[in-house]
Image (spheres, rainbow, N blue to C red):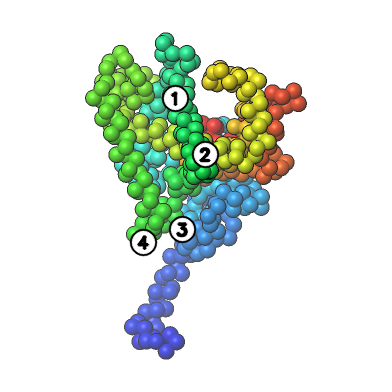
Amino acid sequence: MFSVFGLPIPISATELLLASAVFCLVFWVVRTWRPRVPQGLKSPPEPWGWPLLGHVLTLGKNPHVVLSQLSQRYGDVLQIRIGYTPVLVLSGLDTIRQALVRQGDDFKGRPDLYSFTLITEGQSMTFNPDSGPVWAARRRLAQNALKSFSTASDPASLSSCYLEEHVSKEAEYLLGKFQELMSGPGRFDPYSLINLSNEFGEITASGNPADFIPVLRYLPNTALDLFKDLNRRFYVFVQKIVKEHYKTFEKGHIRDITDSLIEHCQDKRLDENANIQLSDEKIINIVMDLFGAGFDTVTTAISWSLLYLVTSPRVQKKIQEELDTVIGRARWPQLSDRPQLPYLEAFILETFRHSSFVPFTIPHSTTRDTNLNGFYIPKGRCVFVNQWQINHDQKLWEDPSEFRPERFLTTDGTVNKVLSEKRVEGNLL
Ligand code: HEM
């Protein structure tokens, strides 16, 4: 019997010594095991982390800020550990372009995360470790469906495409809601309508500790419970829409993306590029991916725009003046007016840059052993891409914490193309 502070512990000193030795051995093996680095390459630098937990406590509530600070010290390519899992963290515009664009095939994978299995019953196109021909065929189908609705138009409508028609209708509803609130008694508090939380993104962007430390899945975890509930509700909501579309589907009268995917199921078309035939489930679940990707992001973007307008009356006035001069008050703005509205464009760019409300991309993973900036990255390494760091990089923006749409305008008042391409928000895809 062993005793600590006078309390008897029902194991012998030998058993305790043995258990400690086994623990230390396992810890040492795990810590010192590193993939063999080929000659001429280095392993990415790694800040000191806690035993067992790694850097999970260091990341805290704002991992994008902490990782940006670490990148100043360790460089654009660094490695952290969440539990025992090594995670590569990328910062810097050139490095991220190099990885996601020039070496896109090496970095196009997605890690096999537990939280991904909770999305679309594990059948999502995006949150899925598959990066093979089935994934590529689904991605092409999604891209084509989106493209056709942003180019095809209803001949009876003044809008340039179906997408514009839908967006204009939604904008009208939103303005109607504002007017209704403004005509009511008392003050209209826009903050009550502004929901700045991106619940889905918060879990998926830099993973959840439970993705990397399995025991956390079995302990009380409010964030994970909310995420499960959100996904369940969303699944039911979209399935209902899909069922309604099936009931009212008419061949030759394609109303939207869901219809076009149903048509694809019925035609059982082969993917020309890969000769792959996708199951109906794999096709229809793309609706979930598109709805999911476009829903929370666009809502959050609108909320942030409203917040900046409310808090920057000077900017709001300049946008109003531009709209009044270019369009007037007799008609709604249209997509074709966009090139004549540079200040509005600059405001949108600055809203995305300054808020960076999607601070990380969805985690990537390497599809093969690769070399990034002289660092050896083995196949299957989980990769966090810190977009927030680029959007707040002192070297690129001089005063990154200022909200200043003018930074995106040239001296002659047009949008500065070079600078606008430096801002990232998932647009490297
Ligand atoms: C303000 C709006 C939006 C923002 C900020 C945004 C941002 C992002 C980001 C950061 C990614 C992850 C990129 C990566 O992992 O490398 C992404 C992926 C994706 N987005 Fe968006 N997005 C927006 C709107 C939309 C809309 C409207 C749609 C479609 C209707 C859409 C469809 C997708 C899809 C399908 C993917 C996954 C692509 C893949 O895995 O291959 N997004 N988006």
Between the C-alphas of marks 1 and 3, the distance is 48 Å
**Label 3 near label 4: C-beta < 8 Å?**
no
Identify residue type, mark 3: Gly
Query: Which badge, 1 or 3, is on the more N-terminal residue?
Result: 3
Identify residue type, mark 2: Ser
Secondary structure under tag 2 reads helix
Query: Which badge, 4 or 1, is on the more N-terminal residue?
Result: 1
- The residue that disc 3 covers is 83
Marking on residue 219:
4
**Is 17 left or right of 350, judged from the image as shown?**
left
Foreground label between 2 and 4? 2
- The residue that disc 2 covers is 303
Rate crowding at label 2 as few (under 14), some (14 to 19) or many (20 or more) other CA atoms within 10 Å: some
Marking on residue 76:
none
> Quadrant of residue 421 in the image?
top right
Residue closest to the far left: 247
Residue name at image x 43 percent, y 65 percent: 26
Identify residue type, mark 1: Lys
Between the C-alphas of marks 4 and 3, the distance is 16 Å
Rate crowding at label 4 as few (under 14), some (14 to 19) or many (20 or more) other CA atoms within 10 Å: few
Foreground label between 4 and 3? 4
**Is 141 left or right of 419, judged from the image as shown?**
left
Rate crowding at label 3 as few (under 14), some (14 to 19) or many (20 or more) other CA atoms within 10 Å: many
Closest to the observer, 34 or 214: 214
Query: Which badge, 2 or 1, is on the more N-terminal residue?
Result: 1
- The residue that disc 1 covers is 169
